[in-house]
Image (cartoon, rainbow, N blue to C red):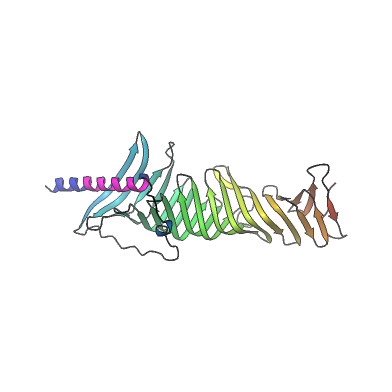
Amino acid sequence: MRIISLITSCLFIGIILGLLLSRIFFSQTEEDIVLDDVVPQTEVLVQRRVPKFEDASSISVKNMHLTESESGQKKWELWSKQVGFDETTGIAFFKDPKLHFFVNEKNDYFETTALLGEVNQENGNLVLWNEVKGDYQGLEIFSEYLNYYNVIKKGYFHGNALAKQDSLTIEGKLFEIDVAAEKIYVTGDVVAEILRVSDGEKNPIIIKAPRLIYEIKNSQIVFLDKVQTVQGERVIDSEKLTIYLKKVKKKQVLSKIIAKGSVNFKDGEGTLGTGEILTYYPKNEYLLLKGDPVLTKGDNIIRGDIIKHFLETNRSEVISTSKESEVEAIFVPGEGLRRLD
């Protein structure tokens, strides 16, 4: 009888969890949902209760492994050292859960692990807490909590949230994960640090902005709303900034940076630059200024269609885009800027 009871409990929990997780990831979005009611408030961290797997009101099973597939294509896969379902609250608890959510036909998946977790039967929401870690194609996200909201099909890492990928580190208050679109949205005092291959840790690039969008598929990170980029004594201020990454020996490294909108550049040697677009090429250590660009150092002034400025040698070139283009250059003896004819 005890064996029959255990088998029945395992089957019951398997069915319940299968229904819950299918509902979490694949049910239709409800209409008329107010997002403010479901998106977590990052200022207040929810205190999770400690699940009691051995309560008389719960059914508990150890070493659970569940998989959901359709037409040979995996949808999700779950492992947990211990699972308990509380019939009185409709809450399923997990100990050491690991969840794979498959995003395409190649069986690429977003992995999430934690020490504890729960699924609410009433609304289908998933919560993980304590040493939460997410991993997708080498991008690792660490936080205290993960909330997955069924009605909007998105997950939120919050509580000392931090992301790492090779030479890139990102900090922010809230990481929103849109697995289907392969995008990550980070908001709240965003700080990103990029280590260049040639510099190691000597001259990291620090970028600060209110928010960013990481387009994983395109290897691009877009910073928005008053962005400041600092590398040593060099500073770039802009409305928007995009960093482009590329794979070198299976690692993501910085390819180039494009700043747009009211761009201001300065270095530690008195060189100032303005324009609408600035493109920085780290491999060859030069930048291009476009959009009514002006470069000054002391009383020296350069204007033209495009200004190419070499950072290591502090020299500049003016590039004309047509024969009718005008170039203005004012030079004062003893200053560092010079035009190359």
Q: Is residue 247 above or below residue 271?
A: above
Residue 16 in sight in this render: yes
* 37 left or right, relative to 2: right
Whether residue 336 is visible here, answered yes or no, is no
Q: Residue at coordinates 83% horizontally, 62% vertically from top-left?
A: 299
Q: Is residue 223 left or right of residue 174?
A: right
Q: Residue furthest right?
A: 333
Q: Nearer the viewer, residue 9 or 290?
A: 290
Which x, y percent locates residue 63? Answer: 28, 48
Left/right of residue 263 with respect to residue 186 in the rendered view: right
User: What are the residue bounds of the magenta stretch?
Assistant: 10-25
* Residue 213 within the magenta-colored segment of the rendering: no
- Residues 62 and 276: in front is 276
The image quadrant of residue 50 is bottom left
Magenta region, main secondary structure: helix
Q: Residue furthest left?
A: 1
Looking at the image, which residue sits at the far top?
Answer: 71
